[in-house]
Amino acid sequence: LLEHRNDQESEEFHKNLISDFFKNTAFTGYFINTKGRNDLVIHNGKIAKDSVGVIIEVKKLSNKTEMLSTKNINSKALQELVLYYLRERITHKNLDVKQLIATNFYEWFIFDAAIFEKCFAQNSKLVKQFTDFEEKRLAVKTTDGFYKEIAKPAIDSAIEELVFTHFTMKDY
């Protein structure tokens, strides 16, 4: 994985490297691809119709403002993960999501889905706002509006509970 990196390349380039790495290591036999607006998902089986088990948000290395950091986790990448999790959990009624990951190839933030369940899917105010947003009943119509007006405050209110694993590939 590290041998093929190219810090000048795009998010798509690194997303493909990550996908290939997962397909050839820990997730052989699992379907890995995009799903809707999700950068990458790992399904819980061999076909695209199998439920999603892992949601991955990939950011370009140079995109520091949208990527989580240990000093600021409430970034666009995490806000996107909240939206994608709610779509899986609420819209698709998927109980099988296990992890959510945000990465810029070097930095990795891994969240257990149980944390997202507690902080977000069981937050009735957030779920109502999400449902109203998805059904276009709010003044907020864009995903950027959802991130700033709905996800950001929800993350702020749950910030103390958002436990995650963090590591950097630069250590290897």
Image: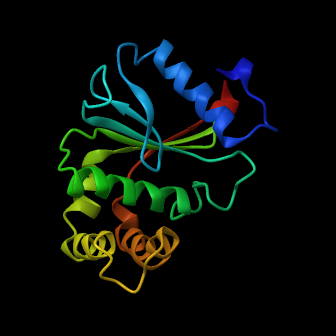
Question: Quick check: 127 above or below 16?
Answer: below
Marks counted in the figure total 0
Residue at left offset 30%, top offset 23% = 47
Near-viewer residue (91 or 123): 91
Residue at left offset 75%, top offset 50% = 62
Q: How is the image coloured?
A: rainbow
Residue 14, how many percent across, how many down? 65, 33
Asked which quadrant contains residue 97, the reply is top left
Question: Quick check: 32 above or below 157?
Answer: above
Near-viewer residue (37 or 3): 37
Q: Quadrant of the C terminus?
A: top right
Asked which quadrant contains residue 157, the reply is bottom left
Image position of 41 (left or right of 92): right
Residue 92, how many percent across, how many down? 22, 50
Residue at left offset 47%, top offset 14% = 25
Examine the rendering and report whether any part of residue 106 can be seen: no
Residue at left offset 42%, top offset 81% = 140
Residue 1, how many percent across, how many down? 64, 20
Image position of 77 (left or right of 159): right
